[in-house]
Image (cartoon, grey):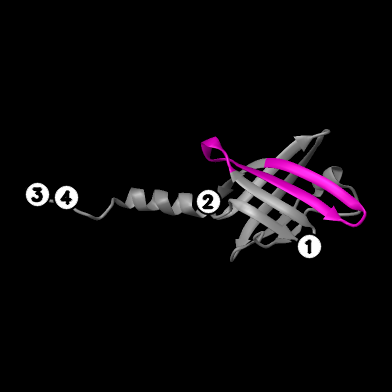
Amino acid sequence: MRLLNARPPIAVLLLVALCGSALAFEGQYAGKRGTLVIKQRPGGTFEVVVDATVPGCIAELTATGRVSNDVLVATKNQFGSSCRVTLRKQGSTIALSQGPGCSTFHGASCAFAGTYPPKR
C-alpha cells in the first residue's frame, strides 16, 4: 500500500490562511465610545454593529462588508447617505475609522471611530 504525501497542496494552505485572517475579526468588542460586534455571514460577508454610547449621544450603525488585505470595510446606505467604516486588527483590538458620511448616522456630538478591545 502506498501512502499519500502528507503535505497539503499550497492552494489549501492559502485558503486556510485567508479564512483565518477574515475570521480574526469576528467577535465582541467594547471601547470608550461603545460596543462593536462583528459576525460572519454567508458568502464571506460580515455584519458590523457599532453602538456609540457616550454622554450626549446614543447611536447605532449596522453595516455589511468584506475583508480584503487584512482590512474589513463595511458600508451602510440609508437616508440618502452612505457610511463607510474601516476596521483593522491591532493585536486583539480593532481600530475603527469612519468616512465623512457617517455623521448622518450618529450626529455631531459623537463618532464611531476609535479603538475597541475584546469584550471581557
Measure the C-alpha gap from mark 4 to mark 3.
7 Å
Q: Secondary structure at mark 3?
A: loop
| Residue position for label 3 | 2
The tag earlier along the polypeptide, 3 or 1, is 3
Residue depicted at 53% across the width and 40% down the height = 44
Measure the C-alpha gap from mark 2 to mark 4.
30 Å
| Residue position for label 1 | 32
| Residue position for label 2 | 23
Q: Are marks 3 and 1 in contact (CB under 8 Å)?
A: no
21 part of magenta stretch = no
Q: Secondary structure at mark 2?
A: helix
Measure the C-alpha gap from mark 1 to mark 4.
53 Å
| Residue position for label 4 | 4
Q: Are marks 4 and 3 in contact (CB under 8 Å)?
A: yes
42 part of magenta stretch = yes
Residue depicted at 46% across the width and 51% down the height = 18
The tag earlier along the polypeptide, 1 or 4, is 4
Residue that extends furthest to the front in the rendered view of this protein: 120
